[in-house]
Amino acid sequence: MSKAYYRVHNIFSDKKRKEMIELANKPGAFIDNSYGISFYKHPLQLDDLEIDGVWQVQMLRQTVKESKIHKDRNRNNEFDNIYMPRNAVISWPIQGDGDTIFYDDNKNVIDRVSYDNDGAILNTGGYFHNVVLNTEQPRIMFQMCFDSSFDDVVSFYEGHLKDERY
Ligand SMILES: [Fe+2]
């Protein structure tokens, strides 16, 4: 099993995905940052989606063909200071398509995950990574963000989240 990613199923209804896309496409919904992926400005507004749990929800928007290679860390949201864990995330594409590529500390490619309308748990704190778009339109992702370890999030998904539907 890869230590960088773990494939998961879609757990959202078409109606819920439509609500996500509507929120994402409101003017000024995202704040840009340095590496080609914008963050949803007010993550607490995403509570309206009623997808609550031991995670923080967030949406990301990528417009550049290839985002910068980086590792994430737990931090406070740059716009309104909401705590945003990013040690491991579960990421579902809701618009557009792309692959997440993982690298070792010398920036050699070690893994690549495609989504095929499902999602993946990403070891965003453990490995360098970036995203290459496969489609022209901006890619929008819905994420559950965790400060627990990648292995713990995989266990949590298998034990609790796999059969949930939103
Ligand atoms: Fe990242």
Image (cartoon, rainbow, N blue to C red):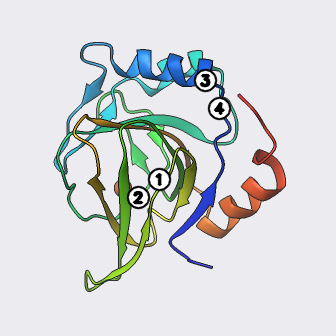
Q: Secondary structure at mark 4?
A: loop
Q: Nearer the viewer, mark 3 or mark 4?
A: 3
4 and 2 marks in contact (CB < 8 Å): no
Q: Give the Cα separation between the discs numbered 4 and 2.
A: 26 Å
Q: Quadrant of the C terminus?
A: top right
Q: Which residue is mark 3?
A: 14
3 and 2 marks in contact (CB < 8 Å): no
Q: Please name the amino acid that badge 1 sits on.
A: Arg
Residue 19 screen position, x and y as percent? 52, 16
Q: Which residue is mark 1?
A: 86
Residue 74 screen position, x and y as percent? 45, 53
2 and 1 marks in contact (CB < 8 Å): yes
Tell me which numbered mark, 2 or 1, is placed earlier along the sequence: 2
Q: Is 10 on the left-hand or right-hand side of 66?
A: right
Question: What number is the disc on residue 73?
Answer: 2
Within the displayed image, which quadrant is ligand 1 positioned in? Answer: bottom left
Q: Which residue is mark 4?
A: 12
Residue at 35%, 82% in the rendered image: 104
Q: Secondary structure at mark 2?
A: loop
Tell me which numbered mark, 3 or 2, is placed earlier along the sequence: 3
Residue at 38%, 60% in the rendered image: 100
Q: Is 17 on the left-hand or right-hand side of 103?
A: right
- Label 1 CA crowd tier, 10 Å (few <14, some 14–19, many 20+): many
Establish if 4 lies above or below 131. Answer: below
Tell me which numbered mark, 3 or 1, is placed earlier along the sequence: 3
Q: Please name the amino acid that badge 4 sits on.
A: Phe
Q: Please name the amino acid that badge 3 sits on.
A: Asp
